[in-house]
Amino acid sequence: MRDIHMEVVYQRPTTLTETPMHYCPGCGHGVVHKILMEVVEELGIQSETIGVAPVGCSVFAYDYMNIDMQEAAHGRASAVATGIKRVLPGKYVFSYQGDGDLAAIGTGETIHTVNRGENILMVFINNGIYGMTGGQMAPTTLEGMKTSTTPFGRDVRTMGFPLKITELVAQLPGAYYVTRQAVYNAQVVRKLKKALTQSFLYQRRNKGTCFVEVVSNCPSGWKMTPVEANKWLMEHMIPYYPLGDLKVPKE
Amino acid sequence: MKTNGMDDVRLMKGNEALAEAAFRAGMQAYFGYPITPQSEILEYLTLHAHEYPGVVVLQAESEVAAINMVYGAAGAGARVMISSSSPGISLMQEGLSYMASAQLPALIVNVQRGGPGLGTIQPSQADYFQAVKGGGHGDYHLLVLAPSTVQEMVDFVIEGFKLAEKYRNPVMILTDGALGQMMERVVLPPKGVLPPAPAPWATTGKPPTRERNIITSLFIQPEKMEEVNLVLQAKYAQMRESDVRYECIQTEDAEIMLVAFGLMARICQKVLELAREKGIKVGMVRPITLYPFPTTILQQLAETARVFLTVEMNAGQMVEDVRLSVNGKRPVHFYGRLGGIIPTVEEILEKLESLC
């Protein structure tokens, strides 16, 4: 019998735990967790990285990421990250929040954290809905989009407009690098990985706040199959939330 | 107070003395937001932070942000303090509940003012319930220290950090606008009076040699949540066992027992002196820890005293704990003024004489 030589070409990064993720099939969170942790592993900064999880679907992020983490109150992840970074300025600190957490209840903290130029990475998952609580309207819910609290579609005359918080924070002098990425196919995932890597490298050089929005999906909340959800995302979310850099360092 | 000539003796405002004591007690981070009558704490700390390299002093965008910065810094193992006054402390209650659940040590200072609502900027003791019963949601307690002099504003900073670190629980200094604003002679502690406390549970970055450290107050399985609650309750039982503090003044032969804390205890001490001059046998218990409450001594004194009079700058809050302690054995009366009014010696004496 011929010897079969098998080479490991891909495996779970050591920065992810073996805990099975609770995310719904097709959800973008699992991919973003994995990419974020791959970057931490590749940069060799596992022992120097502290993450902050939010309230929302990624509330259990610390079950999956094999690094020191803190779980913040709803909306306060960037304030908690500020507290950590200020007392451990030599460490890498990131916050990870959804749209309700970062752009509704935590808007004040988001703007002031970036305005102070806190030297952290803020990861913002925008899927236009409150997933964990069962699919209610988020600040980023598109006009006309149906959710459990906009059963007839979001009416901007009474419910406000979908908030482009990333465009807003890009205006602030404390923001060093602001970009909008996605996870719906392999090509955009690679771009996201590049953005996250770059953000940690900027943090190493004490440059200010790096803000990475990830336009993501919510098949369960949107009541679609994963395939339909990604198609809907490309047709509706991306035109309103176009991908690309909003602020790049001049260097 | 005797000093040996080597001591660092100063005339200082309560708020400023407390701030200086925090530096000397090895505070590593402070987060705050301006509010009268405690803004001198933030002002003093920002003015002098450069004398203590590495110490973080940050003015946050709100009390809500500030308490969550405290959560983050305490979770990262730092010795942290925050201060505010009543309305601001209300805004921090969610954060305090999270910190109690996540078992994070920190020192919280409430320089109380009159309420409810935006209230007044005059001194008050109306946040007693909020301070000792938990304040936020869930079954938890802060350990609460009530200074009655500027010297105690200094001493309780050191005690507060010690107790917070001993129990991994937030400790509150419950003081008021008068103590914060008044100037008195204080003996300051030397720098480095409190060695750093080890925090092996803190999120400082996971080395390969240990499992990851998680700071959280989320325990979604009710069985696990109950376990965590029982751990907290065991700590509170330990506090009641080991860290009840109070002062007794002329209680041995007293027929009428005054009970008062903080600023009110100073005023009641004068009442006691005047009453004694008139031949009235009055004593006083001054609770120093408001939680854990000095229940046992009040039970004991209920054997010898005929009647109790609790005096507070509120509508009657601590009096409920006094009544629980005395447990119906003796009548417990109350005298108080509300909304930022400080009761005078004369009016308290009049009330006291009505009990003779």
Image (tube, coloured by chain):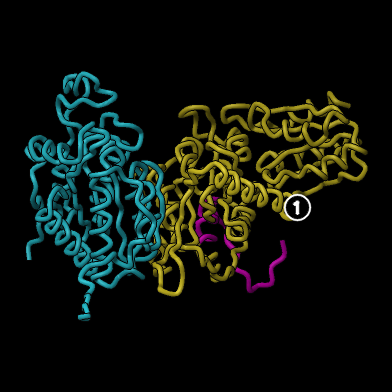
Q: Residue furthest front?
A: A1
Nearer to the camera, B329 or A248: A248
Q: Identify the residue at horizontal 25%, vertical 26% (top origin).
A: A147
Q: Quadrant of the C terminus of chain A?
A: bottom left
* A20 in the magenta segment: no
Of B158 and A179, the residue lying toward us = A179
Residue B124 image offset from top left, x and y in percent: 59, 35
- Would residue B43 be visible to someone looking at this image? no
For the point 38% across and 52% down, which residue is it? A80
Q: Is residue A77 left or right of residue B188?
A: left
Which chain has been coloured cyan in this picture? A
Q: Is residue A105 left or right of residue B78?
A: left
Tell which subunit mark 1 falls on.
B
Quadrant containing the N terminus of chain A is: bottom left
A199 up-or-down from A152: above or below:
below
Residue A83 is situated, as x and y percent measured from the top left of the image, at 38, 56
| Kind of element beneath mark 1 | helix
Q: Position of residue B340 (x, y in %)?
A: 57, 31
Residue drawn at (36%, 70%) of the image: A47
Start-end of magenta stretch? B1-22
The residue to which callout 1 is attached is B241
- Tell me: B222 left or right of B248: left
For chain B, what colour was chosen?
A: yellow
Work out whether residue A189 can be spotted.
yes
User: Relative to residue B349, is residue B12 drawn left or right?
Assistant: left
Q: Is residue B7 magenta?
A: yes
Q: Which residue type carries mark 1?
A: Glu
Q: Residues within 10 Å of mark 1 (few under 14, many from 20)?
A: few
The image shows residue B182 at horizontal and vertical percentages of 57, 47
User: Residue visible at 87% across and 30% down?
Assistant: B330
**Residue A129: quadrant of the picture:** top left
Numbered disc total: 1
